[in-house]
Each structure stands twice: as structure tokens, then as C-alpha cells.
């Protein structure tokens, strides 16, 4: 689509990661994250290239009891860039260093009470959580956006330090996340039967760090997010998530799904996803998704997925395949058809022979199947 082109991403040549962890160091936990990346691109006239080195030592002091947890953490995010500027940006080499202290405070309290329903005893919890982050502002406009994007707004993201994925942008932050979780736990088995969450982030200062073409976030508080999940019937799990925009009094995101999984190799799922663009007030995602894996005969399994866009009135992804499992070996064939942004759809065929606990031959579709079919198992 010429009006909305998809840019070619950078190549990683290579990327090396280091993770070090030392618990109970004088009562504190020490973590070190390190990463070296070299980014290259074919478009040398328009795209900067370069090397990036990141070191992020962190030290935390977890204070834990049976009823509450309080964890202050202090880190120092250090980045060094050796950049080969594109011809369009003047060419030449440039070195940039960035050092940012990051402080966070995470606290949770757990209240419990016992109850009884349908002849079973259960434990209900009420878990308020408060998470504070402070990161000073630093101008990062000269640093290229090699692998950084705005993360999806969800429960994992509101309890994270940085609203961006990758390492090229570290947001300035003076913010507080407040959330409340309630669970219903079966006392006999320990299984979680129901879970409900609601949360929101509050900002004490305006946003200054941003990506190119990024819409600035609200000044005082984020959207409200809520989710529910649980067992609605034997072996049947359902979940729903909702994101509400206060300023426009509208839902920005909604998703709901149900999964029936009586055993390994037996799973059927259905879900619906909706996402609205706050700028245009139009849907950008309006999809249904059907997927499953089920035995067809002795040692034979059928697998499939159908992802359909209600907005575009077309199938985005269709997957169909067969698996034969003989115990010590297995063979699987899978066909995938993907809609293209322009031109005809792309069709791929995977055929794999797997010798259990030894090796496999052919194109491996397992990553595709695990991503596309919730609950898929070998």
C-alpha cells in the first residue's frame, strides 16, 4: 500500500546477550543485563547503521512476608552507540552515550478469606498492587530507532519501567500504577478457578521522550484496563480483556476468547479481537480467530486455524495440516496461506519427519503451530 508503506527492518549482525543474577547479596538481589548489537541496512542513503552496547546493572531489596511484598529497586541503564550516519543525515561517524538512573518501588498486599459454594471450599483473595517508577528526562533524538517500538498497553506493560520495546528509547517517567486483582482458588486442588484484574497508570509529569510520529500519551492518567478469566465449564477456559478511553468515552480495545482442552492433543478455541484508532475513531483490528488440534483416527491428528478480518472482509491467515504420531517417530504436513498487503496471498508448505528425542528432517512448523493454535501440544 503506497499510502502506508512497511519499512524494511534492520538486520542484526550479530546480537549477543548477557544475563547475570546473584540473589541474597548482603540481603539484596543483584541483576546484570548486557547486550551488544550490530545493526545494518541495505538503504545506506536513508538509514543510519551502527553498533550498540547496553549494560544495565540493577539491585533490589525484596521485603517479603506472607501477607505483603515490598521491593525497591535501583538500576543504572548505560548505552553506547557507534553510528554510521546515512548520506541523507550528513554521513560520517558519530558516537553517543546515554546513562539513566532508574528507580522503582513495587508493593503488593494479599487479603484472603475462605468460602464454600457448590459443595467445594475455596479461597478468595483481594490483592491491591502499587508500582512507582522514576526516570529522569534525557534528550535521545540523535539516537536512531534501530529496534524500538511502542509496546502494547496491557497488564504486563503497566508494570514495566519502559513503555518502549528495544533499547533505543528509555521513557522519562514519574508515574504510579494502581491495580486490584481478585482470585478464586480451589482449596482441594490449588487450581485457580477465576481471576479478575483492573488497573490504571497515573502520570505526575508530561511526556517528553517520544518516537517519530508517536501520538503523545494523556497528561494525567492512562486508559483503564480490566480483564477476567477462569474455568467456565469442565476443561473449558474463557477470558476477556477491555481497555477504556476516558477522554473519548469509548473502548480502544476489546478481546474475548474461549478454549476447550480436555487433554494433550485435544484443543478447540475461538476468539474475537477489536482495536480502535483514537485519532480516526475507526477500527484497525476487527477479527475472529478459530483454531484447533484434534485426533481424527488412531495416531492421526488434524490441525487448523482460520483468522478472518471483519473489517477487510477477508481471511488473514488459514492453516491446515495433518500429524501422524507413531510414538518413536512422527510426521506432520502443514499448509499456511497468508494474506498480503499487496498482490496475491502467500502460500507455504511445511513437511517434517521427527525422530523422537533425536532429530528432525524437513521444514519445522512447530513454532508456527504453537503461535497460531492456543494450547497446541506434541
Image (cartoon, grey):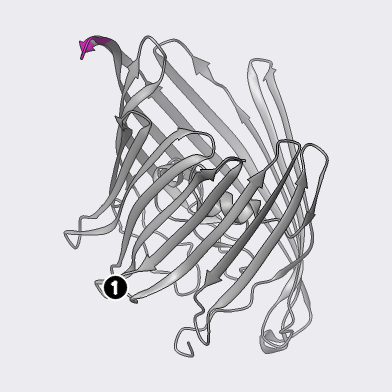
- Give the percent coordinates (x, y) of residue 335: 59, 65
- Give the percent coordinates (x, y) of residue 132: 42, 37
In the orientation shown, which residue stands out farthest toward the front?
Answer: 298
> Which sits in the foreground, 356 or 159?
356
* 17 relative position to 177: left or right: right
Q: Is residue 146 in view from this perspective?
A: no
* Quarter of the figure that contains the C terminus: top right
User: Taking 111 as reference, is 215 above or below it?
Assistant: below
The question of residue 145 being in magenta is answered with no
Give the residues drawn in magenta, as a range.
116-120
User: Taking 298 as reference, is 35 above or below it?
Assistant: below
User: Taking 61 as reference, is 156 above or below it?
Assistant: below
- Give the percent coordinates (x, y) of residue 39: 74, 68
Q: Residue at x 52, y 62 (%)?
A: 319
Q: Which residue is mark 1?
A: 279
The question of residue 117 being in magenta is answered with yes
Q: Residue at x 20, y 14 (%)?
A: 117
- Give the percent coordinates (x, y) of residue 78: 69, 49
Count the marks: 1
Amino acid at each position: 500500500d503506497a499510502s502506508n508503506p512497511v519499512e524494511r527492518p534492520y538486520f542484526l549482525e550479530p546480537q549477543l546477550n548477557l544475563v547475570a543474577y546473584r540473589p541474597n547479596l548482603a540481603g539484596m538481589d543483584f541483576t546484570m543485563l548486557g547486550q551488544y548489537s550490530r545493526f545494518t541496512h541495505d538503504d545506506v542513503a536513508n538509514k543510519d547503521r551502527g553498533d550498540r552496547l547496553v549494560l544495565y546493572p540493577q539491585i533490589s531489596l525484596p521485603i517479603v512476608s506472607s501477607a505483603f511484598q515490598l521491593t525497591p529497586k535501583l538500576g543504572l541503564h548505560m548505552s553506547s552507540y557507534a553510528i554510521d550516519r546515512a548520506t541523507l543525515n550528513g554521513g560520517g561517524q558519530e558516537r553517543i552515550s546515554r546513562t539513566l538512573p532508574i528507580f522503582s518501588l513495587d508493593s503488593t498486599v494479599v487479603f484472603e478469606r475462605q468460602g464454600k459454594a457448590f459443595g467445594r471450599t475455596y479461597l478468595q483473595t483481594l490483592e491491591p498492587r502499587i508500582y512507582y517508577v522514576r526516570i529522569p528526562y534525557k534528550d535521545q533524538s540523535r539516537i536512531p530507532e534501530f529496534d524500538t517500538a511502542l509496546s502494547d498497553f496491557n497488564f504486563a506493560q503497566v508494570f514495566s519501567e519502559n513503555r518502549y520495546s528495544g533499547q533505543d528509547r528509555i521513557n522519562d517517567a514519574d508515574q504510579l500504577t494502581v491495580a486490584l486483582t481478585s482470585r478464586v482458588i480451589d482449596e482441594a486442588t490449588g487450581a485457580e478457578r477465576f481471576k479478575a484484574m483492573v488497573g490504571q497508570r497515573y502520570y505526575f509529569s508530561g511526556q517528553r521522550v517520544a518516537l517519530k510520529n508517536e501520538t503523545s500519551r494523556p497528561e494525567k492518567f492512562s486508559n483503564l484496563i480490566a480483564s477476567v478469566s477462569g474455568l467456565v465449564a469442565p476443561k473449558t477456559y474463557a477470558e476477556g480483556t477491555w481497555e477504556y478511553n476516558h477522554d473519548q468515552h469509548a473502548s480502544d480495545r476489546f478481546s474475548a476468547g474461549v478454549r476447550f482442552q480436555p487433554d494433550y492433543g485435544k484443543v478447540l478455541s475461538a476468539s474475537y479481537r477489536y482495536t480502535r484508532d483514537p485519532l480516526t475513531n475507526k477500527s484497525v483490528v476487527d477479527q475472529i480467530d478459530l483454531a484447533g488440534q484434534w485426533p481424527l483416527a488412531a495416531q492421526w491428528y488434524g490441525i487448523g486455524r482460520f483468522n478472518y478480518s471483519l473489517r477487510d472482509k477477508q481471511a488473514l491467515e488459514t492453516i491446515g495440516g495433518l500429524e501422524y504420531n507413531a510414538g518413536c517417530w512422527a510426521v506432520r504436513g502443514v499448509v499456511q496461506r497468508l494474506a498480503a498487503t499487496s498482490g496475491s496471498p502467500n502460500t507455504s508448505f511445511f513437511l517434517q519427519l521427527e525422530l523422537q528425542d533425536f532429530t528432525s528432517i524437513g521444514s519445522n512448523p512447530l513454532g508456527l503451530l504453537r503461535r497460531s493454535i492456543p494450547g497446541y501440544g506434541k
